[in-house]
Image (spheres, rainbow, N blue to C red):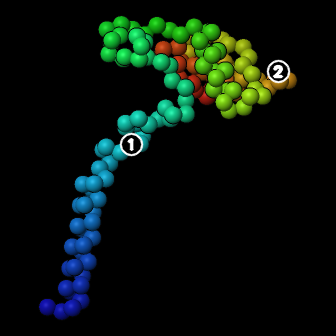
Amino acid sequence: MSTKKTGFKFATFTAFFFIVAGMLFFNPLTAMACGYGNSGGSDFVPQRQAPYGGNQAAGAGQTAAAISQDQAKTIVTGHVNRLNPDLVVGNINDAGGFFEVEVTNKAKEVVQMLGVDKYSGRLMLLN
């Protein structure tokens, strides 16, 4: 056997070995990205607290109660104050499944429109 063929076979086997080993150790099905695990920006977006003292399973048979406009204002105010204390919460409108909340500057100009989901409390950008 020639040295070139042996080197090629060794390189092919080594590459195959690393590909298989990588697939075993870094399984893309268990990756913590794109909706798997605890991803999706939960560390950056305020979350509504679970009912019944934080136990999700205790209220599993009941539907979640919709949050009020005051609760939506509290969620947005906390979020805005962390990002930029110079901004304030403006008008809040009921838009069906969520509340539309205006974020304004001190001159009362609308800077951003945010949505607050009525059932999860999650924030969403509207513009």
Seen in the picture, residue 106 relative to 91 is either above or below; the reply is below
Could you say where residue 67 lies in the image, as x and y percent from the top left? 53, 10
Looking at the picture, which amino acid does disc 2 mark? Lys
Q: Which residue is mark 1?
A: 32
Residue located at (35% from left, 10% from top): 59
Residue located at (41% from left, 17% from top): 54
Residue furthest to the right: 107
**Can see residue 23?**
yes
Could you say where residue 28 lies in the image, as x and y percent from the top left? 32, 48
Could you say where residue 82 lies in the image, as x and y percent from the top left? 66, 30
Looking at the picture, which amino acid does disc 1 mark? Met
Q: Quadrant of residue 86?
A: top right
The tag on residue 74 is none
The tag on residue 108 is 2
Residue located at (36% from left, 7% from top): 62
Q: Quadrant of the N terminus?
A: bottom left
Could you say where residue 102 lies in the image, as x and y percent from the top left? 71, 20
